[in-house]
Amino acid sequence: MSGTPPVRGLGDVVERFYDRHPYPPPAKDLEAVAARTGARLERRSAHHLVWPERPYGAPQRVLIAGCGTSQAARHALLRPDDEVVGIDVSSTGIEHTRRLADRHGSTNLTLHRLAVEDVAELGETFDHVVCTGVLHHLADPLTGLRSLRSVLAPGGAVTLMVYAPYGRAGVYLIQDYCRRLGVTTSGDDLADLVATLREIPGAHPLSRLLRESRDFLDDDALADALLNPRDRAYTVGELLELIAAAGLRFGRWARQAPYLPDCGSISETPHAARIAALPVAEQHAALELFRGTLARHTVIAYDEADETSGRVDFADPAAERWRPIRVPTAIAIEERLPPGAAAALLNRAHGETDLVTFVTEAELAMFRRVDGSRTVGELGPDARPFAERLYRHDLVVIDASGATP
Ligand SMILES: C[S@@+](CC[C@H](N)C(=O)[O-])C[C@H]1O[C@@H](n2cnc3c(N)ncnc32)[C@H](O)[C@@H]1O
């Protein structure tokens, strides 16, 4: 095999790259995460985002696939009852993760230097597989995703984040530019690149990302974005095909409002009804094209044989008994409002500024009654359409488990 570069997993160009440029930039400690360990409602909200129907509380087995420098340590710290396994091909990433786990005394984390493609070697299954920012670096992402699906426990879920092409157009232009100039990841080359990027035209597609994204603040992060040896992006349609080909079923986008025609400025246009008449996957694809700036997609998916996990249908009469839970980043703004509005509700985690929903006094009163315990029926008369609006705008998740919180 001499002269043939390995194409996957261990020994690969991507492994060597991340050994030299660990991502995210290593953290000294996780004090900010540790401070949130008491936030039970936040954890319950994260749980029901993935499993509306599954009661919160039972410990879970979680795989962080391609854990980088800190993600698995964060997860273990935030959810001390879960059993967390982190895998990565980069020994530097594993080392940083281990240091963080030791520093915070986590005993619920196991780490392996292992490729996503070989995860079945663990001989274990997981309730939740989290794979963010990894699959698009693999030589064969479909093989990687199939491997992850093969380790799902019954009723398990995959949370997957991959790059999206249109919002990253500027990244791909500059990646190509760097390739043509032979820019390497040496310190001198990175310093020259940073100096050059300061002069990039204000209207260049990369300029918005340079202003808005943390990915350009540090040399390793800059290298990750612009000099990565392998990086591809998925349109909505391509990602849905990848998921189906891996034997998974699309559940939802982790933040769904940007993909929905009834949320944000598109809902005010003459095209809103036309988009809403399309099949759901086409609606999402159309919204990606309309927005033009989505730089990543985070999707929650289930095994294709699992027909029940993750279903939320407000036409179900049981919806009256569901308990909405506010997401931690949902806020109500009560100043500088248009006439007739009592508040503007928004999710601070949305990058899109148009994803605001204006509410009346009566609706604001219902929103204030959302406390994770009250059911939809207890929010007020005829609250179901309003609860659905909150849900579609990513302001609440739904606890449909029937369990008493
Ligand atoms: C952009 S970083 C993301 C890290 C982490 N998931 C996060 O969100 O913070 C990508 C990580 O995937 C790892 N990786 C790349 N290819 C892999 C493979 N085939 N198997 C396992 N890990 C891989 C890299 O070593 C790197 O640590």
Image (spheres, helix red, strand yellow):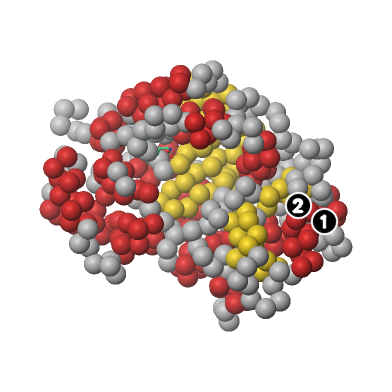
Give 387 or 239, whichever is nearer the viewer. Answer: 387
Q: Which residue is mark 1?
A: 379
Q: Residues within 10 Å of mark 2 (few under 14, many from 20)?
A: some
Q: Is residue 317 left or right of residue 53?
A: right
Give 72 or 113, whichever is nearer the viewer. Answer: 72
The amino acid type, in three-letter code, at marker 1 is Leu
Q: Quadrant of ligand 1?
A: top left
Q: Is residue 248 left or right of residue 229?
A: right
Position of residue 10 measured from the top left corner of the image (x, y, whole percent): 31, 28
Quarter placement of the C terminus? top right
Can you tell which quarter of the image residue 97 is in?
top left
**What residue is drawn where x is 68% and y is 56%?**
391
Position of residue 261 measured from the top left corner of the image (x, y, whole percent): 59, 69
Quarter placement of the N terminus? top left
Q: Residues within 10 Å of mark 1 (few under 14, many from 20)?
A: many
Position of residue 62 measured from the top left corner of the image (x, y, whole percent): 56, 30
**What residue is drawn where x is 43% and y is 48%?**
162
**What residue is drawn where x is 58% and y is 35%?**
36
Queried on whether the Cβ of the residue with tag 2 lies below 8 angstroms from ligand 1, the answer reads no
Q: Which residue is mark 2?
A: 370
Inspect this view and state whether residue 65 appears: no
Give 158 or 8, whichever is nearer the viewer. Answer: 158
Q: Is residue 4 left or right of residue 35?
A: left
The answer to whether 78 is drawn above or below residue 285 in the figure is above
Measured Cα–Cα span from mark 2 to mark 1: 7 Å
Element type at marker 2? loop
**What residue is drawn where x is 21% and y is 34%?**
5
The amino acid type, in three-letter code, at marker 2 is Val
**Mark 2 vs 1: CB contact within 8 A:** yes
Position of residue 150 measured from the top left corner of the image (x, y, whole percent): 53, 32
The answer to whether 345 is drawn above or below residue 221 in the figure is below
Queried on whether the Cβ of the residue with tag 1 lies below 8 angstroms from ligand 1, the answer reads no
